[in-house]
Image (cartoon, helix red, strand yellow):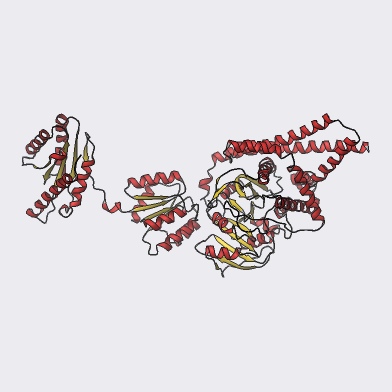
Amino acid sequence: MRELLLGYGTVIMYYVMAVSLIYFTLMFLSYRGIYSMIKGAVYSRFQSLSGSAHAPPVSLLVPAYNEELTIIENVKSLLTLNYHTYEVIVINDGSKDNTLQVLIDAFELKPKTDETVHYAIDSTKIKAVYYNPAHPNLYVVDKNNGGKADSLNAGINLSHYPLICSIDADSLLEKDALIRMARVYMENPAETVAIGGNVRIANGCVIRDGDVKDVRLPRKIWPMFQTLEYLKAFLGGRIGWSHINGLIIVSGAFGMFRKDYVVKVGGYREGYPGEDMNIIIKLHRYMLKNKLPYRVAYCPDAVCWTQAPDTYRILSSQRKRWGRGNLKNMLENRDLFLNPKYKVFGLLTVPYNVLFETLNPYFKLTGLLALIGYVAMDMTHWPILLTFAAINFLNGYLLAVGSLLLEELAFRRYPRMRDTLKMVGFAALMFLGYYQLGVLWRLQGHIEFLRKNNSWGVMTRQSWNQEPIGKPSTVTTGGEA
Amino acid sequence: MNNVSAVRKLNDRMYQAVLEKFWFGDRKKPVSCGILLVRSVHAYDEMLAAVRGLIETERRLPAEVLADPAGRQAAFLLFDSPWSETHYLALMVKGLLKNIADGEYAVMLARVKDRAERNPQWFEEVVELFEQLPATEEIVLFHERKAATESQSVLLVDGDEEVRGYLQLRLKMKGYRVLAARDGRQGLDLFRREKPDVVVTDLNLSGIDGYHLLTRLRGEDPDAGSKIVVFTDNRVEEAKRKCFELGVDDYVTKPFSPADLEARIERLL
């Protein structure tokens, strides 16, 4: 028993060292990426790019399921982006509320009869396309319920432009978000297959006319933790991954894709959460298999503001869903694991995700058990335990503060000094419970997966106006951040 | 400084004099008359005599003076005087006043416009402006504000504060009445209220998207009384086509030449 515990302790130590090393490397790459990004932004004028015919037209796909409270506001905001040619395709996924009717009334839409939909990808049949020439950039698609992925596929079938961009119906895009993404795309149009955007949490911010006017921290504790979590994941992680072309996910809330390749890989996978990670894995697989040069880019200055769940119930349900989606994707793509044919993606990204994301709860859990074992068998002393705890904490805290610093260096979205200090403080608080809950939720997600539960769980919607109105409704949006 | 009746008196008297000249002269020919307005706070009478003397010796004609002692000002009417002569006299008068009037004086030069006999308001405008003129050493030339452009208004809808401010200033200097709006909604409100002659709008706006704003503007104004100029970053052919389809009169892209934009606005009016 003692040998077993001792051996386990050694393994776990290497595990922790490996994960820390990876995190710090990613952080380092993020800093390098940010540095060149800031330099690039100084020299490129995206403002004049926004009117240039060289930037390709974009189709925005907005799947909507029971979104009657917020949809009008969001569509209005999406129609006023700073981009020369784009269309907004809202896909009503057989909503049970009045989503479709509200849209028809607000924009005075009429059924468009001369629209022929080319079913390049399998999707539920489109019942009708609504249009109003007075809003030439807006299309509303009505179809039977088929889930988020199916809605996106239907949207792709209708879309008229070579780039597609998926956006959650509960998210707001910044006015310049598209053009900033297009700038990244134009750096290498031949090879870029997907670009991820930066998702930020809008809870607490002042929003007027579909525009984030004043950036503040959320007042509630759950969104507050998520704000820090997102900052860390997006700035500290994804910039780094994109630097070595190993990005495994582009957020479902805001990502841009080349339509031709999305069609080639068969569109989004239906019937299971985690479709945003799935499409990226499929793209990597396709491009590497066919030995095509490609990159999956990330654009941290293209910002999408989303509403984070602000209650325990909804947050846990979202995280369990992510846990399920992640596990499913990893199991489906286990042949990529350490497969040298798939280069960085197979050798680094997938193993990282399996070992440090998917299996993370088991290491944490067994670690806890082992700890109890050490104490019970008197194999350790308090000073040693405390030292380990302190190192662990400092490690994590350094990473968290590192991503905050990145934010302050490059973006400065939170103008108040008080907010910055608050974030530094809360970054420490997260070690007392929030991270542990994350482990628990992921574990619960895996249990749900084994029980073959593949529903979306609960998700409530609030109006973008300050006071939450109306009754909560279930919805099929979200995705792994 | 002056009470209102005195003001009215001076311009009325000027108008009367021009009217008489018109009726007693050759009615087919327009009245030609230079007007020299002089004000001197100190040594008013002295000044009056000196200027009269100067004009009479130069023109070898009796000068027609309309004095307004209460306002310490006077108008000299120089009938049938060529513009060059009027101007020369004004310069001489200025030199004279420099010696007599001890700093506080003003000279204004005007030329009655065609058909002045039907337009007493013109005289009122001249005198009013002269009244408001501070003491100055320079001769002020009266230019009539063009009555035509005065009522012409331009509605500027642009989200960029700098562009808006700059154009507002330039167009104002051109004599337009400029209305500025930050976003589509404000623009639409102003359009409804003011019915401007020209709308200069960006396509990239917050609140309402550009194309929709264009349809709304056309909907509000079906007989196209207001001209619309789209003024935008968007250089894509498709966007231009769409805009012209929506009934836009002109399309100017940024980065822009202000002279070009102004010329296009002017041509539409």
Residue at the image point whose x is 26% and y is 48% from the top: B145
Q: Can residue A394 be seen in this view?
A: yes
Residue B250: image quadrant is: bottom left
Position of A9 relative to A96 (above/below): above
| Placement of the C terminus of chain B among the 4 image quadrants | bottom left
Position of A343 compared to B234: left or right? right
Position of B19 compared to A35: left or right? left
Total numbered labels placed on residues in the image = 0
Percent across and percent down for residue A168 are 63, 55
| Placement of the N terminus of chain B among the 4 image quadrants | top left
Position of B148 compared to A308: left or right? left
Percent across and percent down for residue A213 are 54, 46
Position of A3 relative to A188 (above/below): above
Single out the residue that lies furthest toward the bottom: A113
- Foreground: A480 or B61? A480
Q: Can residue A35 be seen in this view?
A: no
Percent across and percent down for residue A128 are 60, 68
Residue A415: image quadrant is: top right
Percent across and percent down for residue A310 are 67, 49
